[in-house]
Image (cartoon, helix red, strand yellow):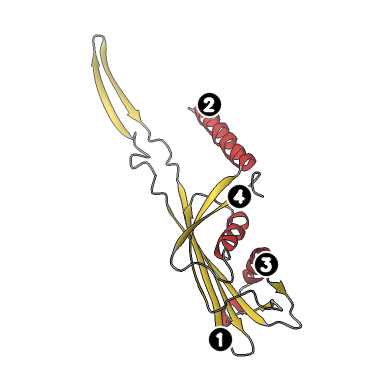
Amino acid sequence: MGRMLRVFSMLLAAVALSGCATGFLLDNQVQSFSHLTALPSPATYRFERIPSQQADPAQSALEALADPALHRAGLRRDDAAPRYSVQVSARTLRMLSPYADPWDGWGGGWGMGLGGRGVSIGFGMPFGRMESPWFQREVRVLMRELATNQVVYETSATNSGPWLDNRVVLPAMFDAAMQGFPTPPPGPRRIDIQVGANSP
């Protein structure tokens, strides 16, 4: 039994490493709203935080994950002379995978057998439950023109999947959320982002 568990663990590790080596395609559901008709000039911004984010030490890390996507969209951070403020947020919910085996964990109980040479009694132990983690994530970007205090751009991306590392997944989701800036198509749309070794 111990040898089988060790072999199984090695196989899982090999699959995980091969996944990291080849990358994966992250599918996102994106919806954006814009009052902009063209890329503004100068397209400078600073990050804005609501009171609950002011006290959250993770907010700086989240802004660092979002900043490259904002830069690729044509925006430039300038805390001294910003034209816009940008508020970013993220939510991660861990749940059981929709593909989890409903029979996972079976095997416990006892049994009795009658053979030609006597009676035998056996007890079975259940296999340890192997949890199938699944994450539902959402990122949001809210962009406000400082001179008028008006929201000029709002976008969000959602994703559900088994990927564990927010430091890898969230930047890709911010990239998806900023696709089409500043004139995104109307309505929800799917945007796939390549993550890992094959990403551009």
Q: Earlier in the sequence, mark 1 or mark 3?
A: 3
Q: Are marks 4 and 1 in contact (CB under 8 Å)?
A: no
Query: Closer to the camera: disc 2 or disc 1?
Result: 1
User: Residue 23: which disc?
Assistant: none
Q: Amino acid at mark 2?
A: Arg
Circle 3 residue: 67
Q: Kindly indicate the quadrant of the structure image that contains residue 54.
A: bottom right
Badge 2: residue crowd in 10 Å (few <14, some 14–19, many ≥20): few
- Secondary element under disc 2, as helix, strand or loop, is helix
| C-alpha distance separating marks 2 and 4 | 34 Å
Query: Closer to the camera: disc 1 or disc 3?
Result: 1
- Taking 116 as reference, is 92 above or below it? below
User: Residue 150: which disc?
Assistant: 1
Identity of the residue drawn at 58% across and 81% down: 50
- Taking 101 as reference, is 49 above or below it? below
Q: Earlier in the sequence, mark 3 or mark 4?
A: 3
